[in-house]
């Protein structure tokens, strides 16, 4: 350890290297791997007949090994007199044509264009810290001078961002082609700080500067080059490779159940995400069979947002059930093709084996686990871009129950399903009812025909409007029992809903709740377009949509006066994931705004809030503000999710859950679908009583 520089500046100090080589003696010091590590890429770009200038050679054996395999035109230069004398004496008899000279790489005595290649193993890294990069800049300029047309500067480097940026920008500016190879970890394990991937920078000189920059990245010595548009993109790829190497090093040295690191593997030809791997270690003291070191679990396509796979708590349960020391959970990305389980295993095996826990035997078989041995199924049926929320995808997936579901996912937060509806085959359902048999599941082919919900030819799929996929939506519908919906003297129900999503909740209210008139406020026009085009949302005189900010809409309604609602529902998400509360945005639960909401309710009115808050202190504060405005607040949590639905009213008297509420729920259950035009073709599938039984006082 004492041989290594204490500061970065020492890397390029002649005095430091004098002390270093005197202390180290004759033992070779291979900074970033030896000949065996580098030979593949070196032979690719430097030919035995080339005249090569080796910059900052040190006492590395690389030049000797190149000489021994036929490279006889090597000129080695270094600023250390000690190392130059030692290397000349060492090679005088065995390699008489291998010369070492004490020369400053920033000002060499060689003629312009006199070399076909310049080889640099760590010298750029050493010099870049001096004079704010000016010293390295002079060295690069000198290399450019002594290289002929078609000559190559081949630099072995750890690719520290400031270093690689300096070199790449220098050569791009003078019109050279730039290519960077990532070779992986260095061979030398002498010090853990060098457990970083080794890169080889190859810069090629042209007779005339290139009109457009040529900037390429390759994985390994033979990887296909991927063209990158700007230097920033190259630096981003380098950071990703380095982060992966550090993660792999950490995983090799220990297990940690409290940490669940993840990484994304991209499709090499396109650079698009293909797999996301999340590492889950078993907790200390867990009783794991001795042979259960390591396993890979393949998440079915379209199921990566399920609680079991998408959240840390769920993956912990999955790992405990699998009972291995380390489980890697693999999610497949949308708009990628996967042939079958065997093909996925073959593709992943080389990479995931690098994530094995320490101490696993070399010949240990690693099982690939899955649900029923299948990859699942997903088809992207539409995609687009919202000006407010970015890119989105509408996709059909097969659920755990074998049914097909349609989902809206915003790619900025692709771990969250924004909206979901179940799909049904109306022709199959009609046949089932005709034959008086139990409901049969539609059996799609591997690639079932998909149409928009408004198109219903024989055999086509459409949204099942009688089924609410989201549990918090079902709770909100059950909360209508607090109004006495379904009794003869309460026929009309006016609803204001902030947040459209796929439109499943407001469409259900309009279609099945007697007398319901629903106004939806939605901020994003793209969401309305998707809801109408892909989720069967059909506005009419009893179901209207106002495009705009929900805050402004409620403020304007209160200011204008003369309008009240039986129900006001908030089901609107926050665009800021850093707040600790993803639903609703904080402004919707400020006391002054909640007062306005209360003023817009009829005397029997109910305010319903979908609250998604992971911050316990923030959640306590929100509940306090809600209770300050609404004396009666009932709540129901959603199993396996963070969601909690609050049912709030300004009624006084009873402080607990009213005993009459279950009776009202049964009345509501019987009223759903009565006088509905959809009753003959679509049945509301909801158990009001079950949903109300778990209510508690918030």
Image: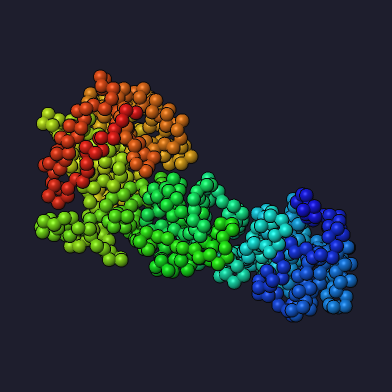
Q: How is the image coloured?
A: rainbow
**Left or right position of 131 against 300:** right
Res 394 quadrant in image: bottom left
**Left or right position of 89 against 369:** right
Q: Position of residue 334 (x, y in %)?
A: 40, 59
Res 447 quadrant in image: bottom left
Task: In this rendered view, identify the residue nearer to me: 374 or 451.
Answer: 374
Q: Quadrant of the C terminus?
A: top left
Give the vertical position of 650 relative to 424 (above or below): above
Give the vertical position of 489 relative to 153 (above or below): above
Q: Is residue 190 visible in the rendered structure shown here? A: yes
Task: In this rendered view, identify the residue nearer to me: 352 or 101.
Answer: 352
Q: Is residue 239 visible in the rendered structure shown here? A: no
**Left or right position of 216 against 391:** right
Task: In this rendered view, identify the residue nearer to me: 480 or 108.
Answer: 480
**Residue at 32% in and 28% down:** 697
Res 605 quadrant in image: top left
**Residue at 51% in and 51% down:** 281
Q: Position of residue 80 (x, y in %)?
A: 86, 61
Q: Position of residue 326 (x, y in %)?
A: 51, 55
**Residue at 33% in and 57% down:** 397
Task: In this rendered view, identify the residue nearer to me: 36 or 174.
Answer: 36
**Residue at 12% in and 29% down:** 489
Tally of numbered discs: 0
Give the vertical position of 200 relative to 357 (above or below): below
Q: Position of residue 297 (x, y in %)?
A: 44, 58
């Amino acid at each position: 350890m004492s041989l290594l520089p204490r500061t970065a500046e020492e890397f390029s100090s002649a005095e430091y290297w004098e002390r270093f080589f005197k202390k180290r003696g004759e033992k070779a010091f291979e900074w970033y791997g030896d000949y065996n590590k580098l030979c593949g890429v070196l032979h690719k770009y430097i030919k035995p007949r080339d005249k090569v200038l080796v910059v900052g050679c040190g006492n590395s054996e690389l030049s000797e090994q190149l000489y021994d395999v036929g490279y006889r035109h090597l000129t080695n230069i270094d600023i250390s007199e000690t190392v130059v004398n030692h290397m000349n004496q060492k090679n005088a008899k065995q390699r008489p044509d291998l010369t070492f000279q004490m020369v400053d790489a920033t000002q060499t005595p060689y003629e312009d264009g006199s070399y076909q290649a310049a080889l640099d193993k760590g010298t750029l890294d050493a010099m870049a810290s001096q004079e704010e990069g000016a010293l390295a800049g002079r060295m690069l300029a000198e290399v450019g001078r002594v290289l002929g047309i078609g000559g190559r500067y081949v630099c072995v480097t750890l690719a520290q961002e400031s270093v690689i940026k300096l070199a790449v920008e220098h050569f791009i500016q003078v019109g050279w082609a730039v290519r960077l190879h990532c070779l992986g970890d260095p061979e030398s394990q002498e010090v853990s700080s060098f457990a970083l991937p080794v890169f080889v920078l190859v810069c090629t000189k042209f007779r005339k500067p290139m009109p457009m920059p040529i900037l390429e990245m390759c994985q390994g010595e033979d990887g296909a080059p991927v063209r990158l548009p700007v230097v920033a993109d190259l630096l981003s790829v380098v950071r990703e490779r380095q982060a992966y190497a550090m993660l792999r090093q950490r995983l090799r040295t220990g297990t940690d159940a409290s940490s669940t690191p993840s990484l994304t593997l991209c499709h090499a030809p396109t650079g698009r995400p293909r797999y996301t791997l999340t590492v889950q270690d078993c907790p200390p003291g867990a009783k794991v069979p001795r042979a259960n070191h390591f396993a890979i679990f393949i998440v079915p396509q379209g199921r990566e947002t399920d609680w079991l796979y998408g959240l840390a708590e769920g993956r912990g349960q999955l790992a405990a059930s699998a009972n291995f020391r380390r489980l890697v959970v693999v999610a497949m990305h949308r708009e990628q093709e996967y042939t079958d389980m065997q093909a996925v295993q073959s593709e992943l095996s080389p990479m995931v084996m690098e994530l094995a826990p320490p101490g696993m035997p070399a010949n240990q078989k690693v099982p690939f686990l899955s649900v029923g041995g299948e990859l699942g199924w997903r088809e992207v049926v539409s995609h687009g871009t919202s000006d407010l929320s970015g890119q989105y995808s509408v996709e059909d997936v097969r659920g755990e129950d074998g049914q097909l579901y349609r989902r809206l996912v915003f790619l900025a937060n692709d771990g969250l399903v924004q909206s979901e509806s179940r799909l049904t085959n109306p022709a199959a359902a009609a046949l089932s009812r005709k034959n008086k048999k139990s409901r049969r599941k539609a059996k799609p082919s591997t690639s079932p025909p998909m149409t928009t919900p408004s198109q219903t030819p024989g055999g086509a799929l459409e949204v099942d409007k009688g089924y609410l996929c989201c549990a918090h939506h079902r709770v909100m519908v059950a909360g209508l029992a607090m109004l006495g919906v379904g009794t003869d003297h309460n026929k009309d129900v006016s609803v204001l809903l902030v947040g459209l999503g796929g439109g499943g909740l407001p469409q259900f209210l309009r279609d099945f709740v007697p007398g319901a008139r629903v106004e939806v406020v939605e901020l994003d026009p793209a969401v309305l377009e998707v809801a109408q085009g892909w989720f069967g949302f059909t506005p009419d005189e009893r179901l209207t949509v106002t495009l705009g900010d929900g805050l402004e809409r409620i403020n304007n309604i209160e200011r204008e006066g003369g309008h009240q609602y039986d129900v006001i529902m908030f089901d609107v998400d926050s665009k800021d994931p850093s707040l600790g509360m993803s639903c609703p945005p904080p402004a919707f639960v400020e006391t002054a705004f909640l007062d306005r909401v209360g003023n817009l309710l009829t005397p029997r009115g109910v305010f319903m809030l979908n609250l998604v808050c992971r911050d316990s202190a923030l959640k306590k504060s929100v509940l306090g503000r809600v209770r300050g405005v609404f004396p009666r607040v009932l709540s129901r949590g959603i199993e396996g999710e963070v969601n909690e639905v609050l049912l709030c009213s300004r009624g006084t008297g009873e402080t607990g859950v009213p005993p009459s509420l279950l009776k009202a729920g049964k009345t509501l259950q019987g009223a759903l679908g009565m006088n509905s035009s959809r009753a003959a073709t679509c049945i509301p599938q909801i158990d009001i009583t079950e949903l109300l039984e778990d209510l508690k006082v918030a």
